[in-house]
Image (cartoon, rainbow, N blue to C red):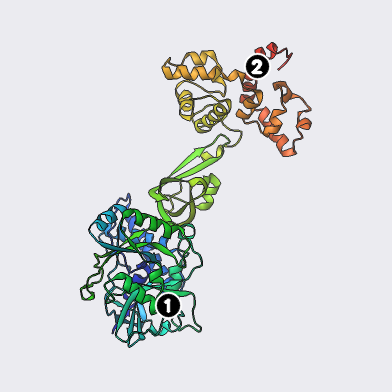
Amino acid sequence: MHYILTRGSWIFMLLQVVTSLAYGMEYHQAKDNCDSPNQNILINEHQRLGNQLQEWNKNYLVDGFSPINDEVYDQLLSKWQQRQRCLSLSDSLPQVPLPILTPLVKHPLPHTGLKKQNLNEITTWIAKRKEIWLQPKVDGVAVSLVYDNGQLVSLISRGNGVEGLEWRKKADFILDLPKVIPIKQRVILQGELFWKLNNHVQKQLGGLNARSKVAGWLMRKKLPEKIEDNIGIFIWAWPDGDLQQEVQLSRLSEIGFDLSKRYSHQVTSIEQIIQRQEDYFSTPLPFATDGIVLKSFPAPPSAAWQSNQNSWAIAWKYPLQNIISEITGLKFGVGRTGIVNVVASIKPVTLDAKQVSHVNLGSLNSWKKKDLLVGDHIQLTLAGHGIPKVEQVIWRVAHRDYPETMLLEQFNRWSCFSYSIECLPQFVARLTWLGKQLGIKGVGEKTWQQWAENYGLSQLLEWLSPSWQGQLPKTKTNLKHLEQLQKVADQPLAVWLKGLDIPLSNTEIKKIDTISMLYEPTIIKYLKLSDKREQQFKHWIEVTEIKLALQIIQEIKKPLAQANGLSRY
């Protein structure tokens, strides 16, 4: 037995519990990303994030609760470690003095850990092996169980794979953990203590911080006051058990560990593995999982087992459900109604097999309330129709470099009915909306913008003018566009009015038969408009560019009206 005198070392040992996703710690080298425009800011952010990670560890391991999702914590820890390596600094969390002595116990057999593999690597791995078994990767706290003469004598946390914390006294309060088994010789098992869940579907609900609940319960300083029936045990290794997996699983079931047999499957093809992974991801289970584990049998003799050395078992993780990414840029766009929309560029991530590099942050006011800037880290999920959205802000950079947005606040519903450099985005948005309502095919936002910037299109309906049309280069594309523009005269008045953003409902618009009706004193009463909507309508009808547009519509509708025997339009 050894004693550690510093909190940092103790936390590092216990951190193995945090990062030991089921079946022990995974070890893999992530590709470092060392790009940084400002090294001083980078160093300061590292220090802040390192301090925060350590505080979360204290909450998790000492206080018994987790203020942050497990997946999010793991991603932030990995990011911090990567950037530490960029700075040629240690990627271990800083040490903090420990006020009390903490005993560690050596595992009778080391925990070997698992390598995380992707589909291509798994395909290669199984091709070289004869007998392969698959189990769910239960998301809990890895432990060693030691039985002597049929009695449970030790329950050791994974720790660093060689040494861990002795939790034997707390084992008496775990209802599902057998304290006595019908085997007299020494038995060493490795498994996962997990928090029980009822019909848990990982794909829909995520991990629900189930791992944190188990770790928090185990790390409480005082012994429990009552039996805990919410903690289960899943055995995933019997190093000295029978060499035949079927026999080993049956024997485990006989001595009180029946989950191993129920959730173990022999597989012979990559297709079976893919199907099993999807099944465990999307069907109800009594525990949280974060992937599957593949094992080759027979395993090497236990005498050959070493910490973090494992060639006979690998993990295939589910796609992350709580994805975090860093904001790398902000784009402010103005819509036709003057609402400023903010879109964040982010470091690309994959959400449900979809590559995501941008996320909508809402209106200008919404963005200000969210207080999101370049360098901040956000948690992402997919909303309806697969649209990415910000679930929450995970980490804000200390240096808050706010962009100037005063000019953006000048846009509103009544701005930019004609072209100017400042008005280009909103004016083009108005033209795009109008063209869509009129059914002008092949003329989209890019074309309208090109016409406004390069060919003097400055009014909403100037594109109807023969003189304006005559200046366009007679390219094949432009000739097709002009052909489309000639067809709009036949469109109903209601379509034109909607395209000009008249502040009326579709039902109200259809009641307007002629342009002249818009100017009749009784129109407000006829449409039964509220005071607020009356003011909006009067404002719209007085906009200079709208007056001009209505005159043009009236002119192009006159021949049609006369042909139909109408005296006015």
| Vertical comparison of 2 with 139: above or below | below
- For the N terminus, the quadrant is bottom left
Find residue 371 and report its horizontal and vertical position in percent.
Answer: 49, 52
Based on the displayed image, in which of its 4 quarters is residue 127 positioned? bottom left
Amino acid at the residue labelled 1: Leu
Based on the displayed image, in which of its 4 quarters is residue 3 positioned? bottom left
Say which element carries label 1: helix
Based on the displayed image, in which of its 4 quarters is residue 433 positioned? top right
Find residue 343 and report its horizontal and vertical position in percent.
Answer: 47, 44
Q: Are marks 2 and 1 in contact (CB under 8 Å)?
A: no
| Vertical comparison of 25 with 218: above or below | above
Q: Which residue is mark 2?
A: 557
Find residue 59 and report its horizontal and vertical position in percent.
Answer: 44, 71
Query: Distance from label 2 to label 1 (Cα)?
Result: 80 Å
Query: Is residue 553 rendered to the left or right of residue 72?
Result: right
Find residue 360 and report its horizontal and vertical position in percent.
Answer: 49, 45
Q: Residues within 10 Å of mark 2 (few under 14, many from 20)?
A: many
**Residue under the image location 51 percent in, 17 percent down:** 483
Q: Is residue 396 visible?
A: no
Query: Is residue 414 rendered to the left or right of residue 312?
Result: right
Please name whichever residue, 103 or 413, is drawn nearer the observer in this view of the structure.
Answer: 103
Earlier in the chain: of badge 2 and badge 1, it is 1
Please name whichever residue, 359 or 510, is drawn nearer the observer in this view of the structure.
Answer: 510
Say which element carries label 2: helix
Q: Which residue is mark 1?
A: 218
Amino acid at the residue labelled 2: Lys
